[in-house]
């Protein structure tokens, strides 16, 4: 088996290690879509990107970002050719499955204070119990201020968590099917057990509210206008005795988000305008105003066109129709513990480079963006020219299951789109695994595509 590891030069291996350490730190500090956008803008501004609202005209080499509500970010490096000739786009999602806190969450029961939750995205609920969780997100107050919450990841922080039943008493629970062995309403997080002194009713809950008031200046009603997520606490870690992999929360799809973002940082004055889309809400159907179905991306590109003097609908349509896109979303890594789900000829393996997925979907390719063969041929050529390792993958054997990405949504604008992502083991689990070789090769793939796709 030829792997990326065996072909890398000594200089590339060194670059791989530096790159993956940067990614490890970035992902550890970017556990929500909001944190990814915030940290992403910081990286982008250091690399010379400026907010779209600060431009009055555009020239080749200009570096532009558009920020949608702090949860969706689009980056552009303006090309020497007019935008109407199309962009080279890489696009990833930066939301990940997690446990969200309900709008009215805090209650006391039997001397314990808990936060009621509602999970987000496709999770195996049993994986999220009996493990340290961090509480991250924002509380927006009526006075217009926003309080950032980040509890559980700083040294010395407490952590939160969800209890599980002891095996001694779980005979009935263990007979249940996996989907219900832990029920959705049993995912409430324990946040306190110590009563407030001299208090008759709900003394534990009141003690928690006192802490929230003292430390964050928030009241119980402020939960109504909050977005708080329970996510696995702790850093992304080197994985394996040989440290060849990374174990951490949120590789799906921040591993493609980060590599796509780093790829566009490296663009200087491309021929075709480079674009990187980092979008929210993919895990629940790309809905809402920060998801890929939102008008935001369309509007941002229209604004760029206007800055270049193109304002007709025909020109706007041309810009999209002449664009090419890699939908950078993770794919499935072959797992020797579960070989039965994969067709080894058509699956991703760790260390073999970026996964090109012609179609996702389920059953008879339902809801797939089936990339055009002509486009795949062009992408192959660009990858070979740049010595990027790639593998052709399906998510699984026929009729085993399936999944989707944002690919079809951009394809609706009549551009060519191919799914191209990094292989992940234990996808959607609290801790997912990727190969460092694939992270590096993903970055090289996105860079080659932005630079050389025509
Ligand atoms: Mn996913
Ligand atoms: Mn994904």
Image (spheres, rainbow, N blue to C red):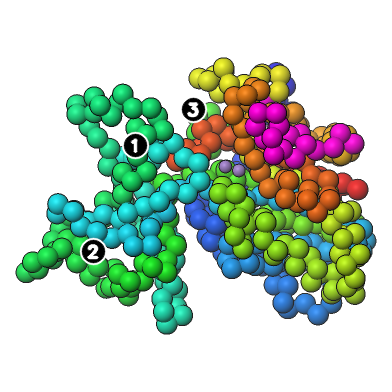
Front residue of 77/368: it is 368
The secondary structure type at the circle numbered 1 is loop
Of 113 and 66, nearer the camera is: 113
Please identify the quarter of the rendering in which residue 212 is found.
Answer: bottom left
Residue 166, labelled with which disc? none
Q: Within the displayed image, which quadrant is ligand 1 positioned in?
A: top right
Which residue occupies 72% across, 55% down?
276
Residue holding disc 2: 208
The residue nearer to you, when weighing 198 against 220, is 220
Which residue appears farthest toward the bottom when viewing the image?
143
Separation of disc 2 and disc 3 at Cα? 42 Å
> Measured along the vertical axis of the image, is residue 131 above or below residue 223?
above
Residue 241: mark:
3
Q: Residue at x 55, y 57 (%)?
A: 33
Q: Earlier in the sequence, mark 3 or mark 1?
A: 1
The reply to whether discs 2 and 3 touch (Cβ–Cβ < 8 Å) is no
Please say whether residue 156 is visible from this viewpoint. Answer: no
Residue 349 magenta? yes
Residue 373 percent coordinates (x, y) = 86, 34
Residue 251 visible (yes or no): yes
Identify the residue at image location x=65%, y=32%: 362
Horizontal placement of 123 versus 281: left or right? left
Which is more foreground, mark 1 or mark 2? 1
| Image disc number at residue 182 | 1
Q: Kindly report the distance in space between the C-alpha atoms of the residues bearing marks 1 and 2.
A: 26 Å
Highlighted range, magenta: 347-374
Q: Mark 3, residues whose alpha carbon is within 10 Å: few (<14), some, or many (≥20)?
A: few
Q: Earlier in the sequence, mark 2 or mark 3?
A: 2
């Amino acid at each position: 088996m030829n792997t990326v590891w065996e072909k890398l030069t000594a200089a590339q291996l060194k670059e791989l290690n530096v790159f993956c350490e940067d990614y490890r730190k970035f992902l550890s500090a970017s556990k929500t879509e909001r944190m990814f956008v915030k940290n992403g803008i910081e990286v982008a501004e250091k690399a010379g990107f400026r907010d779209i609202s600060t431009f009055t005209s555009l020239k080749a080499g200009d570096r532009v970002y558009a920020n949608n509500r702090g949860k969706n970010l689009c980056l552009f490096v303006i090309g020497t050719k007019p935008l109407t000739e199309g962009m080279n786009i890489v696009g990833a999602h930066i939301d990940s499955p997690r446990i969200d806190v309900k709008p009215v969450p805090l209650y006391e029961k039997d001397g314990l204070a808990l936060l009621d939750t509602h999970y987000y995205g496709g999770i195996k609920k049993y994986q999220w119990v009996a493990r340290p969780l961090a509480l991250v997100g924002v509380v927006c107050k009526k006075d217009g201020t926003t309080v950032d919450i980040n509890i559980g990841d700083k040294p010395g922080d407490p952590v939160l968590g969800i209890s599980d039943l002891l095996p001694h008493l779980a005979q009935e629970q263990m007979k249940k099917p996996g989907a219900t062995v832990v029920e959705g309403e049993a995912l409430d997080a324990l946040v306190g057990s110590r009563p407030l002194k001299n208090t008759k009713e709900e003394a534990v809950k009141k003690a928690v509210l006192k802490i929230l008031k003292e430390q964050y200046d928030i009241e119980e009603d402020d939960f109504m206008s909050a977005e708080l997520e329970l996510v696995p606490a702790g850093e992304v870690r080197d994985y394996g005795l040989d440290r060849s992999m990374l174990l951490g929360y949120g590789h799906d799809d921040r591993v493609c988000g980060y590599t796509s973002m780093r790829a566009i940082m490296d663009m200087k004055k491309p021929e075709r305008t480079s674009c990187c889309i980092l979008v929210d809400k993919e895990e629940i159907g790309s809905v809402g105003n920060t998801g890929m179905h939102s008008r935001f991306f369309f509007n941002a590109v229209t604004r760029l066109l206007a800055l270049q003097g193109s304002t007709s609908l025909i020109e706007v349509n041309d810009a999209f129709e002449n664009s090419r896109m890699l939908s950078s979303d993770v794919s499935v890594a072959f797992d020797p513990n579960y070989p039965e789900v994969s067709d080894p000829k058509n699956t991703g393996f760790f260390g073999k480079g970026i996964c090109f997925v012609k179609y996702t979907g389920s059953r008879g390719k339902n809801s797939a963006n089936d990339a055009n063969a002509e486009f795949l041929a062009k992408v192959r050529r660009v990858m070979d020219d740049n010595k990027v390792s790639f593998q052709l993958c399906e998510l699984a054997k026929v009729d085993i299951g399936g999944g989707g990405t944002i690919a079809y949504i951009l394809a609706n604008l009549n551009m060519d789109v191919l799914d191209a992502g990094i292989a992940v083991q234990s996808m959607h689990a609290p801790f997912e695994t990727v190969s460092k070789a694939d992270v590096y090769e993903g970055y090289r793939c996105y860079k080659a595509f932005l630079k050389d796709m025509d």
